[in-house]
Image: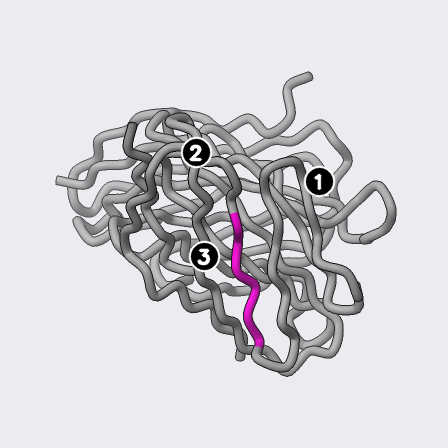
Amino acid sequence: NAGVTQTPKFQVLKTGQSMTLQCAQDMNHEYMSWYRQDPGMGLRLIHYSVGAGITDQGEVPNGYNVSRSTTEDFPLRLLSAAPSQTSVYFCASSPLTSGRRNTGELFFGEGSRLTVL
Amino acid sequence: AQKITQTQPGMFVQEKEAVTLDCTYDTSDQSYGLFWYKQPSSGEMIFLIYQGSYDEQNATEGRYSLNFQKARKSANLVISASQLGDSAMYFCAMRGINTGGFKTIFGAGTRLFVKA
């Protein structure tokens, strides 16, 4: 069971470079999201999606783009990396419907550690 | 707007004792879900427990229970009989169903240290 797969796990960028963090899930979850984790600030929501073709901004969307062309994939793009984007990034997915078996809890990837010099 | 507040940056507890981690929330949604996640030093996020806003009974999962006080907008996590392996970061989270758009937001977290 793959669950949520994030790549790469580690990345070092120079200021101004661009890159894409990949996220894929094989659980047919409608909801997918990206968070960044910084010390003392918990997980902050960057962007999220409730289905293919639908995305919305979270708490800290500036500097990041997303798209959702399929149910399975939700890539996060940094168009021009800045040192302030140095962080650990988590992708997470969940079913939308709550019920006896689904509480709507998030299934997380292992995280991607990004350093911007 | 939705907001989660965890006011305890760090907590210490003696092994085998119980500990309560505080969480308060703010939302205008009538229907929402509350969650607790654990993050050990290895970094992965582990789901612990869920409470729905319409659930009348407090949720329990093994040694974890959620003390849900809707009027006070609090959702404290109680860990009974603490173990050394409980040392970790703990995050409270909320998913709003209506105006929240299903997005899940997190608090800043509480780092729990279990002493032998």
Residue for point 20% across, 53% down? A84
- As measured in the structure, the alpha-carbon distance from the residue carrying label 1 to the one carrying label 3 is 19 Å
Q: List the single residue furthest toward the top.
A: A1
Q: Secondary structure at mark 1?
A: loop
Numbered circles on residues, count? 3
- Disc number at residue A46? 3
- As measured in the structure, the alpha-carbon distance from the residue carrying label 3 to the one carrying label 2 is 38 Å
Chain of residue at mark 2: B
- The reply to whether residue B112 is visible in this rendering is yes
* B39 sits left or right of A84 in the view: right
- Give the magenta-colored segment's residue range: B73-78
Magenta run includes residue B76: yes
Q: What is the x, y in percent for residue B93? A: 54, 57
Q: Which residue is mark 1?
A: A70
Of badges 1 and 2, nearer the viewer stands: 2
Is B21 placed above or below B44 here?
below
Q: Amino acid at mark 1?
A: Thr
Mark 3 closeness class: few <14, some 14–19, many ≥20 residues within 10 Å:
many
- The reply to whether residue A111 is visible in this rendering is no
Q: Secondary structure at mark 3?
A: strand
Q: Which residue is mark 2?
A: B16
Q: What is the x, y in percent for residue B13? A: 33, 43
Residue for point 71% across, 40% down? A70
Give A37 or A9, whichever is nearer the viewer. A37
Chain of residue at mark 1: A
- As measured in the structure, the alpha-carbon distance from the residue carrying label 1 to the one carrying label 2 is 47 Å
Magenta run includes residue B14: no
Q: Amino acid at mark 3?
A: Ile
Give A69 or B57, whichever is nearer the viewer. B57
Residue for point 64% across, 81% down? B71
